[in-house]
Amino acid sequence: MYHGCTRTRGARDQRGLESFLKLHAALGISAGDVVAFAGAGGKSGSILQVASELAEAGLTVLVVPTTKMSLDEARGIGPLVTSEDPEELRGKIKISFSEGNARVAAGSAMLSKGRVGGVPPDLVSDFATLADVLLVEADGSRQRPIKGTADHEPALPDASTLVVAVGNVDALGSPVDEEHVHRPALFSELTGVGHGQSITARAFAQALVEGSLAKVLPGARTAALITGVEPGRTMADASVVSRELWRLGTRHVVLTSIPKDAPTRVWVP
């Protein structure tokens, strides 16, 4: 059923080694892209993975939140620079890249509880020329596998060329409550699945398409990324969600094992 899996079908070099599909390639990310990640259940891990792959491919990568980012995530990217003054922040970013860093994280300020403050979306757009690829964390989810999207979310830069809606397959079949859903009341309002009821594949897909992707500007590409997938039951669950995503008009769907243990695996249904 899957024409793109952890390895491209039949692709082996002369030594018999398998060619593995990279997450950035599956999502279609390349030089010049401004990629906003929204949703829940694996945004941070996906951003880290994509940033690492792009740097290995010889590209420079800037990662910026438009809401907040954890300090651990920022440090996982590379050097972190902050300033509440846009011009000063721009200068710090330039200096960090000039020092030979391939990956740089930037934010407005250090906040409490180990978080980095976000940069307004219009200012993020101004930073697009500072790196080969700009990755944006466009909302938060408090580490829940899926979320209800508020009216002010996601905070997407106008320069976004690709918006990736993220949801973790573990949400499928879970009850709509505070433990499993960020903003469960908003999730119920959007999907019609009430508090305590099980999250269906249709509701999962709606949360991504009609929530995270609802405000994408014309001209930007879209993709859905289902995380937490492994061969077996979760793969079967992800295939059911994928069909619902297709029915709602999102044809570009990618599955990944993130945030589970490495090595990261990627499939394209």
Image (cartoon, rainbow, N blue to C red):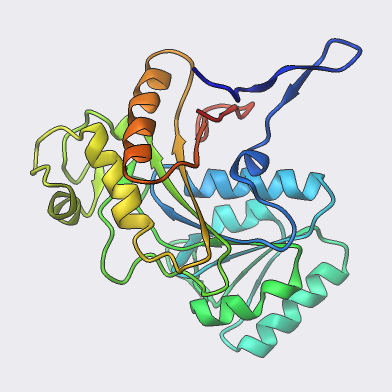
Residue furthest to the right = 14
Query: Which image quadrant is residue 82 in?
Result: bottom right
Q: Among all residues in the image, which is located at the extreme top?
A: 16
Say how many tags the image has: 0
Q: Is residue 180 visible?
A: no
Q: Which x, y percent locates residue 122?
A: 53, 81
Is residue 9 toward the left or the right of residue 249 in the image? right
What residue appears at the point 61 percent right and 27 percent down from the top-left corner?
262
Using the image, determine if residue 22 lies above or below residue 59: above
Question: Viewer-proximal residue, 5 or 69?
Answer: 5
Q: Is residue 246 above or below residue 210?
A: above
- Which residue does the image show at 20% across and 35% down from the upper left? 199
Q: Nearer the viewer, residue 204 or 261?
A: 204
Position of residue 114 relative to residue 107, above or below, is: above
Closest to the observer, 29 or 104: 29
> In x, y percent, where is residue 2?
53, 21
Residue at coordinates 57% horizontally, 82% vertically from top-left? Answer: 123
The residue nearer to you, when weighing 4 against 170, is 4
Q: On the rendered structure, is 267 left or right of 140?
A: right
**138 relative to 147, above or below:** below
Task: Name the spot of residue 247 as percent of width and height, x first.
Answer: 32, 39
- The part of the image, by quadrant, that contains residue 186 is bottom left
Let me know if residue 207 appears in the view: yes
